[in-house]
Image (spheres, rainbow, N blue to C red):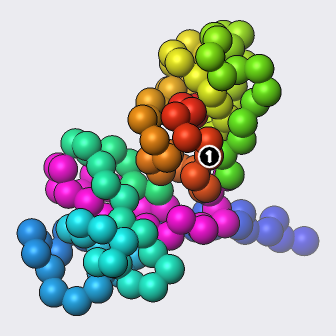
């Protein structure tokens, strides 16, 4: 009996910069939006610094450009608040992907960094808003 082919991994759409002031609403992974109203229905504008990863999209895109993304993408794990971590250091390596509150990269499991935010900025690779002023791996 032949060996079954491995299931292909889904590919993410590439970032596509549409210029400084694009006309019409932007689709998934298209930039440069300034607010959610610049994106097609159900999509939000991911405002970023430098080349911050855009959730659900592939590539670097244009530096400082903002892109439309799907905040309800089921492929992205939800943000999770770990009790007892806000306002104090978590145990080194305690927090996994999309878990918080972290204050330093060392609190995240190997391969993850602590994404610092001041409000409810979207955490790259995660879905949901999380808790105001909490930082997530």
Task: From this view, report whether residue 102 is shown above or below residue 120.
Answer: above
Q: Position of residue 102 (x, y in %)?
A: 58, 23
- Residue for badge 1: 130
Q: Which residues are magenta?
A: 56-77
> Closest to the observer: 112 or 103?
103
Q: Position of residue 13 (x, y in %)?
A: 41, 70
Looking at the rendered structure, the secondary structure element under dot 1 is loop
Q: Classify residue 25 as left or right of residue 108.
A: left
Q: Residue furthest bottom?
A: 24
Q: Position of residue 9 (x, y in %)?
A: 61, 63
Q: Position of residue 47 (x, y in %)?
A: 31, 55
Quarter-wise, where is residue 84 in the image? top right
> Closest to the observer: 131 or 95?
131
Asked if residue 86 lies in the magenta stretch, the reply is no
Which quadrant is home to the C terminus?
top right
Task: From this view, report whether residue 45 is shown above or below residue 52.
Answer: below
Asked if residue 62 lies in the magenta stretch, the reply is yes
Q: Residue at x 29, y 78 (%)?
A: 38
Q: Classify residue 30 as left or right of residue 62.
A: right
Task: From this view, report whether residue 21 is shown above or below residue 71.
Answer: below
Asked if residue 73 shows in the view, the reply is yes
Q: Residues within 10 Å of mark 1 (few under 14, many from 20)?
A: many
Task: From this view, report whether residue 46 is shown above or below residue 99.
Answer: below
Q: Residue at x 55, y 41 (%)?
A: 132
Q: Classify residue 89 as left or right of residue 67.
A: right
Asked if residue 31 shows in the view, the reply is no
Q: Main secondary structure of the magenta part?
A: loop
Quarter-wise, where is residue 34 in the image? bottom left
> Closest to the observer: 9 or 124?
124
Q: Residue at x 9, y 69 (%)?
A: 20
Which quadrant is home to the N terminus?
bottom right
Q: Residue furthest right?
A: 1
């Amino acid at each position: 009996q032949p060996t079954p082919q491995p299931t292909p991994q889904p590919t993410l759409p590439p970032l596509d910069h549409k210029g400084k002031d694009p006309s019409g609403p932007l689709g998934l992974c298209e930039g440069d939006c300034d607010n959610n109203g610049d994106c097609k229905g159900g999509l939000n504008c991911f405002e970023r610094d430098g080349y911050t990863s855009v959730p659900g999209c592939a590539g670097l895109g244009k530096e400082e450009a903002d892109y439309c993304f799907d905040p309800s993408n089921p492929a992205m794990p939800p943000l999770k608040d770990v009790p007892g971590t806000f306002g104090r250091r978590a145990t080194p390596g305690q927090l996994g992907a999309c878990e918080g509150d972290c204050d330093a990269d060392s609190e995240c499991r190997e391969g993850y960094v602590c994404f610092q935010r001041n409000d409810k900025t979207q955490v790259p690779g995660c879905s949901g808003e999380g808790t105001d002023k909490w930082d997530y791996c």
